[in-house]
Image: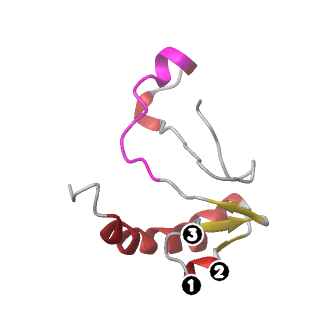
Amino acid sequence: MHDTEDKQWWVIEWAKKEQLFVTQVCPKLGLIATINSAKQQNRYAPDIVVDGQVADLKCQQTPFFKARVLYNLDPQYVVRSIARTTCATSACIHAS
């Protein structure tokens, strides 16, 4: 895994995934999303705008292991969603 403290690397690397999320995932969920225009001037600005709400996109690629105990869901199919900025309720499905 790449150094978690190398913010510059992560910003560049994950910009590709943000674009994929906006163009491929959101339409399948019926969401209107765009890359936040503020990112053109500030690459550290919140990632996307969903249904008019600024949102910070997060990615977790490991299962949420407590899903069975807390929610009676198979951890193999659950990841925990975390949002740290304003997020449209239709865009964030929270396990917590």
Task: Give whichever of 56, 51 is nearer the camera.
Answer: 56
Mark 3 element type: loop
Label 2 or label 3, whichever lies nearer to me, is 3
Residue pictured at 56% horizontal, 84% vertical: 41
3D distance between C-alphas at marks 2 and 1: 6 Å
The residue identified by callout 3 is 45
**Magenta highlight on residue 68:** yes
Mark 1 element type: helix
Q: Where is residue 76 in the image (x, y as percent from the top left)?
A: 40, 34
The disc, 1 or 3, on the residue closer to the chain's N-terminal end is: 1
Residue 50's image quarter? Answer: bottom right
Is the Cβ of the residue at disc 1 closer than 8 Å to that at disc 3? Answer: no
Residue kind at label 1, given as amino acid type: Gln
Quadrant into which the C terminus falls:
top right
The residue identified by callout 1 is 40
The residue identified by callout 2 is 37
Q: In this view, does 71 lie to the left or right of 63?
A: right
Residue kind at label 3, given as amino acid type: Ala
Q: Position of residue 81 (x, y in %)?
A: 55, 42
